[in-house]
Image: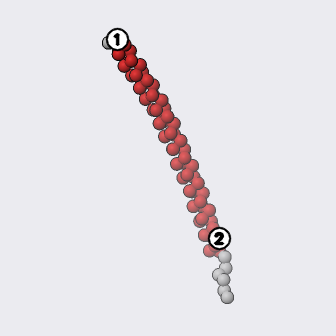
Amino acid sequence: MHSELDVLDQKLAQLVQLTQRLRAENLQLRQEIAAAVSQQRKSQDKVNEAAQRLEKLLSQLPEDTQ
């Protein structure tokens, strides 16, 4: 009976350790996702700005009159 409790105690300790490790990993992944989303938004903003500048430049070109 005592050895069964020791085994159960060890398994419980492993479970607690695994839970803590997974929580830390989950937090890290959430932070990485937030950083990636932020970078993606910045990149999309740059693309949008470039597209607007390009459209403005294209509108300033003379019409092709043939």
Residue 26, position in %: x, y? 47, 36
Mark number displayed over residue 2: 1
Q: Residue at x 48, y 32 (%)?
A: 24
For numbered disc 2, what is the local secondary structure? helix
Disc 2: which residue: 57
**Disc nearest the viewer among 1 and 2:** 1
Residue 38, above or below 9: below
Residue 31, position in %: x, y? 51, 40
Residue 18, above or below 59: above
Tell whether 38 sits left or right of 23.
Answer: right
Query: Which is more toward the observer, 39 or 28?
Result: 28
Q: Classify the position of the C terminus by image quarter.
A: bottom right
Q: Residue at x 65, y 81 (%)?
A: 63
Q: Give the quarter of the image for residue 62.
A: bottom right
The kind of residue on which mark 1 rests is: His
Which comes before the other along the chain, label 1 or label 2?
Answer: 1
Label 2 environment density (alpha carbons within 10 Å; few <14, some 14–19, many ≥20) = few
Q: Residue furthest top?
A: 2
For numbered disc 1, what is the local secondary structure? helix
Q: Residue at x 66, y 86 (%)?
A: 65
Residue 57, above or below 30: below
Tell whether 40 sits left or right of 2.
Answer: right
